[in-house]
Image (spheres, grey):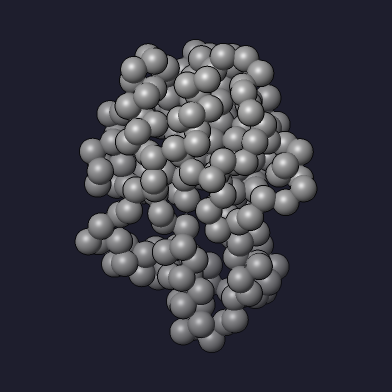
Amino acid sequence: MTLPRKAQAVVFDMDGLLFNTEAIYRDATISVAREAGYQLPLDFYLATIGLPGEATRARFGELFGNAFDFDGFWSASTQRFREATAAQLYLKAGVIELLDLLDELQLPRAIATSSRHEDARHHLDTHGLHDRFHAIVAHGDYAQGKPNPDPFLKAAERLGVDPALCLALEDSHNGVRAASRAGMMTVMVPDLLAPDSEMQSLCLCIARNLHEVCSLIRQ
């Protein structure tokens, strides 16, 4: 597989793509729900990956009712996640190699995430990666979150690059939908969610890891 045009910039998702955080988020959220007396179906949780906070809140309200204390629940889940990652936040395979390649090629890069700036800063600073990105687009920087294209369009705007000339890297279905709707060349690097026929149709290719993305950019 080759890119249909030369990439002038790369836009990354964060959780599940750069960092091995999605499984930790999943386990923390499901365990906190169970302790509070709620059964949180795995397929329901997986469908919320990549969504902004407001959309996730609405989905939980539909599942557990309007009386559900989403703020308290989410705060407890976040605290459980932070406790689990206090010692180390794991980088996904190929992150440093890919960033080094982009430095070599002098390609600008951004992050487009549904997470808060506070969380993005924490994750990136843990590995000294904050300064390796030219823009961080996070919750609050755009009108509508994924699967809408706004986060990716905002990232392209901040980089000063036409979205059609950006390579977007995503692990979630909602993220792939957002990147594709932004008109970017989209590659899925699956984490918790396996690619289905919709993902196959929206992506240039499905990469097993970021090492394969390096090979794709080098071509």
| Image coords of residue 164 (percent x, y) | 64, 18
Residue 68, picture quadrant: bottom right
Left or right: 95 with respect to 71?
left
Residue 162, picture quadrant: top right
Up/down of 212 relative to 115, above or below: above
Up/down of 182 relative to 30, above or below: above
The residue that appears at 25% across and 61% down in the rendered structure is: 86
The residue that appears at 33% across and 20% down in the rendered structure is: 103
From this viewpoint, is residue 135 visible? yes
The residue that appears at 37% across and 14% down in the rendered structure is: 106
From this viewpoint, is residue 139 visible? no
| Image coords of residue 121 (percent x, y) | 31, 42
| Image coords of residue 6 (percent x, y) | 56, 14
| Image coords of residue 132 (percent x, y) | 31, 28
Up/down of 69 relative to 14, above or below: below
Left or right: 4 with respect to 30?
right
The residue that appears at 59% across and 81% down in the rendered structure is: 39
Q: Which of 158 and 141 is in front in this view?
A: 158
Up/down of 87 relative to 92, above or below: below
Q: Which of 97 and 108 is in front in this view?
A: 97
State the quadrant of the N terminus.
top right
